[in-house]
């Protein structure tokens, strides 16, 4: 993270230079917001029972992160540092209101499932964290890439957790049964397979993320904590 | 009275902020390395939740809800106005300013407490559990300010219990042989999951 902050600005850099590509690819693995930076866990876990709300949530965060980072970056020379937290909160809150009204208008069922967690994007630490660590010190285009990269890093964890929880917990993906019909005992259920109801309960989200962290760090040994 | 105790117990154990809703996980994971700091942050969260939830309840019932402006005494022509779409921005503004205010008051009148809570107070403005408390208060539509206050305090106490418990476990786990890739963050997640399963045994408690 520190090396991205100290990047020196160059005059004419191509839009997708190597450094800019890094801004997108780093948060996917080495600098993942959830498993490495430990930001934005609150909302990541609560809405991963099913794939659909997880994807809608990821898209909302993608929008808020991308747009918010650009806005903050544009204003970075105008914001007095003493009141920057309030300014940031106002920017995020306005963007989240847009998302919330949009979801209520076009995706009402999902918006009911997400309940308070749309509002909680405001206090999602990823967003504040990236504003503080990146957008306040970088140009709008770089900040946009950083926002999008981090939102994707957040999204893939969310979607992976939701995939396993929905598949093992209810035997469906996007609400479509993929393992057969549990009532009629077809497909896998004919062999005596049972849905693991435990996966639907909140604690299993934590354990699933714990296992993802375990796998990631086993592959990427430089992330191991002492 | 019984209703109040019920809300209190429920918000501590059954609807625990951490174990049932994962709210405030970021600071929960970051500040739970030692019991001492965990107690400091936990106390600050109880305090701020206990103050902001009732204030936001007043805001919700006298400004934001449909017909609330009439209740405030502004006359019948405001009865149809529904400002609830503004609730996010209002709640977060209230929380940020109350945290700032509380910080100044505590610094002035209780310097000892201030140095104990010090760095944690400003952090709390972006702790999800505070905004979460306000939004759950809105969703559950408490009828009196007493219920809202008790709910805020109860949620705070639940959060306090969770962070102190995990900090104590993390202090002990330093002496165990955790597989290298799980050390630190990974094992904390899994322990929190197991604690959540334990807390599920409180489910359905009603006085």
Image (cartoon, coloured by chain):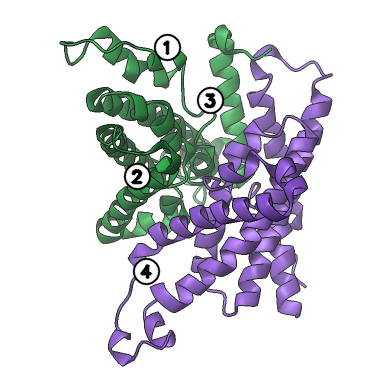
Chain colours: A green, B purple
The residues tagged by marks 2 and 1 sit, at their Cα atoms, a distance apart of 32 Å
The residues tagged by marks 1 and 3 sit, at their Cα atoms, a distance apart of 19 Å
Rendered location of residue B192, percent (x, y):
69, 37
Read off the residue under disc 2: A56
Please, what secondary structure does the residue beneath circle 3 have? loop
Please, what secondary structure does the residue beneath circle 4 have? helix
Q: Is residue A52 visible?
A: no
Is there one chain holding both mark 3 and mark 2? yes
Return the residue found at the far bottom.
Answer: B76
Q: Which mark is residue A3?
A: 1
Badge 1 or badge 3: first in the primary sequence: 1
Q: Quadrant of the N terminus of chain A?
A: top left
Q: Which mark is residue A35?
A: 3
Which chain letter goes with mark 4? B
Front-lying residue, B125 or A38: B125
Q: Quadrant of the C terminus of chain A?
A: top right
Is there one chain holding both mark 1 and mark 3? yes
Q: Which mark is residue A69?
A: none
Question: Residue B183 occupies which quadrant of the picture?
Answer: top right
């Amino acid at each position: 993270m520190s090396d991205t902050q100290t990047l020196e600005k160059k005059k004419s850099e191509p839009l997708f230079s190597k450094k800019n590509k890094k801004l997108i690819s780093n948060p996917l693995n080495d600098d993942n917001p959830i498993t490495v930076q430990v930001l934005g866990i609150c909302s990541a876990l609560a809405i991963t029972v099913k794939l659909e709300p997880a994807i809608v949530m990821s898209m909302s965060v993608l929008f808020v992160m991308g747009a918010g980072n650009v806005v903050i970056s544009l204003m970075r020379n105008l914001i007095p540092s003493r009141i920057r937290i309030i300014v940031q909160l106002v920017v995020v809150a306005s963007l989240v209101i847009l998302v919330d009204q949009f979801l209520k208008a076009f995706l009402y069922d999902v918006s009911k499932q997400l309940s308070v967690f749309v509002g909680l994007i405001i206090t999602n630490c990823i967003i504040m964290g990236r504003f503080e660590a990146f957008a306040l010190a970088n140009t709008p285009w770089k900040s946009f890439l950083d926002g999008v990269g981090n939102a994707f890093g957040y999204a893939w964890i969310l979607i992976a957790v939701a995939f396993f929880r929905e598949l093992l917990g209810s035997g469906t993906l996007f609400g479509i049964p993929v393992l057969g019909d549990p009532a009629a005992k077809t497909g896998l259920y004919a062999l005596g397979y049972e849905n693991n109801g435990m996966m639907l309960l909140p604690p299993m989200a934590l354990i699933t993320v714990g296992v993802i962290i375990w796998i990631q760090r086993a592959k990427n040994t430089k992330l191991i904590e002492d | 009275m019984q209703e109040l105790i019920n809300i209190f117990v429920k918000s501590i154990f059954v609807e625990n902020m951490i174990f049932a809703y994962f709210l405030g996980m970021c600071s929960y994971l970051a500040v739970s390395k030692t019991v001492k700091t965990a107690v400091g942050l936990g106390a600050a969260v109880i305090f701020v939740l206990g103050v902001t939830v009732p204030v936001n309840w007043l805001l919700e019932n006298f400004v934001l809800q449909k017909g609330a402006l009439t209740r405030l005494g502004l006359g019948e022509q405001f009865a149809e106005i529904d400002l609830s779409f503004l609730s996010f921005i209002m709640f977060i503004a209230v929380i940020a300013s109350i945290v700032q205010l509380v910080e100044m008051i505590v610094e002035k009148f209780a310097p000892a407490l201030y140095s104990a809570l010090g760095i944690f107070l400003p952090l709390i403005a972006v702790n999800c559990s505070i905004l979460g408390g306000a939004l759950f208060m809105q969703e559950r539509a408490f009828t009196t300010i007493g219920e809202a206050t008790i709910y805020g305090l109860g949620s705070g106490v639940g959060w306090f219990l969770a962070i102190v418990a995990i900090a104590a476990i993390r202090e002990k786990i330093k002496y165990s042989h955790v597989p290298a890739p799980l050390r630190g963050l990974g094992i904390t997640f899994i322990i929190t999951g197991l604690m959540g399963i334990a807390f599920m045994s409180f489910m359905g408690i009603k006085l």
